[in-house]
Image (cartoon, rainbow, N blue to C red):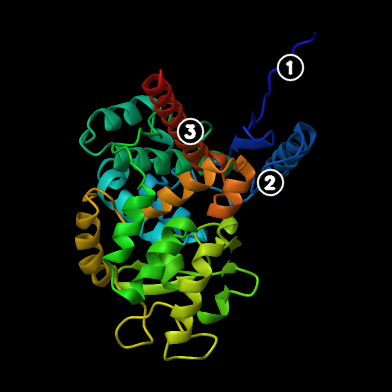
Amino acid sequence: MARRPKRGFGQLTKMRSGRIQARYTGPDAALHYAPTTFDTREDAEAWLVDERRKISEGRWTPPTTTPSATPRVLTFGEYAERWMTRRDLKPRTAVHYRSLLDRQILPTFSVVPLRDITSEAVRDWWAERDRSRPTLWSHAYGLLRTILGTAVTDEKITANPCHIRGAGTTKRARKIKPATLHELETITAHMPPKYQPMVMLSSWCGLRFGEVTELRRKDLDLKNAVIRVRRGVVRANGEKIVGTPKSDAGTRDVAIPPHLVPMLQAHRDALPARGPDALLFPAADGTSHIAPSTLYRVYYPAREAAGRPDLRWHDLRHTGAVLAAQTGATLAELMGRLGHSTPAAALRYQHAAQGRDAEIARRLSEIARHTD
């Protein structure tokens, strides 16, 4: 194969995207880049030929749209701020990313030129992390990797320097033990009547806290035994923000187990507000969303009564997911019911259900031994 002749004027570089970047040193001794990258090498060659002709004919002037000999260096901090503004992030996600940047990432990389962040620099940063907070730092690493991945796509850097295996994932620090049916019954019985349906919807229907507290009369279709999850409420920077669910998959219809319908019917009938937009579980004023602290004041004593001081409110959703998995629901069915956009979370519940099935088998063997 014939080698390409050495170029006498200008340089061409094939970018990671496959496009061609052209540049040359002008009569002013400055390095000038083409105002855009090119689809083909021939197009880039043509641009260089045209620029050289202008120099030869004395028509050349320094391009105003290209970098000068000392181009302004783009720092990671500047690019990260731009990255944040270009993303359509959910409010709580935006707050979380902002915290990760300000506390974990920018103190090290803020003023570092984007192109100077090396794999070694990333490894050094990772080695100095607070190892007592593995989940937080896995999120920080994941965000750094994502931002630098976008920088590759934007052709600001040629390769992503984040290559630490397993840094973006973490094992669950706390193993969740689902509530038993007896424990759920005890917790519900020790809750004020107006909050008892919240326990049922969070456990048996697997709703998130923000989904339950944003439910309105129009979302409860008792005739067809369906809850229409269309919104959720989150708290970010001290504000309550109503928006779409956590992911696109979160917008869903959830079938209500028949044994819950009478309780939900009685609860809805007892609500003083009758309009379709009335909240099912309002705060004391009857119109605003209930605060987590208000619910926890009655939930914590209830879980103590059930002998489960470890059971967080979100663990009720986990309990519901495991119960659904124990019915033999497929992965796709679990994802649809719980509003998951990826299989990973639903798989955890299936594995938990399989573990429960093994426990059932063990107890069956005990019964068999006692009858011998």
Q: In which quadrant of the rendered image does the C terminus lie? A: top left
For the residues carrying marks 3 and 1, which lies nearer the camera in this image? 3
The tag earlier along the polypeptide, 1 or 2, is: 1
* Residue in view at x 39 percent, y 61 percent: 92
For the residues carrying marks 1 and 2, which lies nearer the camera in this image? 1
Residue 9 in view here: yes
Left or right for 39, reference 166: right
How many marks are shown on the rendered structure? 3
Q: Position of residue 33 (x, y in %)?
A: 60, 42
* Residue in view at x 57 percent, y 54 percent: 337
For the residues carrying marks 3 and 2, which lies nearer the camera in this image? 3
How far is the residue under mark 3 from the one under mark 2?
74 Å
Q: Which residue is mark 3?
A: 351
Q: Position of residue 229 (x, y in %)?
A: 55, 67
How far is the residue under mark 3 from the one under mark 1?
61 Å
Query: Could you say whether the residue bearing mark 3 is in a helix, strand or loop?
Result: helix
Q: Which residue is mark 2?
A: 58
Query: Could you say whether the residue bearing mark 1 is in a helix, strand or loop?
Result: loop
Q: Position of residue 58 (x, y in %)?
A: 68, 46
* Residue in view at x 53 percent, y 70 percent: 261
Q: In which quadrant of the rendered image does the N terminus lie? A: top right
Q: Which residue is mark 1?
A: 5
Q: Position of residue 64 (x, y in %)?
A: 58, 55
The tag earlier along the polypeptide, 3 or 1, is: 1
Instruction: Out of 1 and 335, give the one closest to the viewer.
Output: 335
The tag earlier along the polypeptide, 3 or 2, is: 2
The residue furthest top is: 1
Left or right for 192, reference 154: left
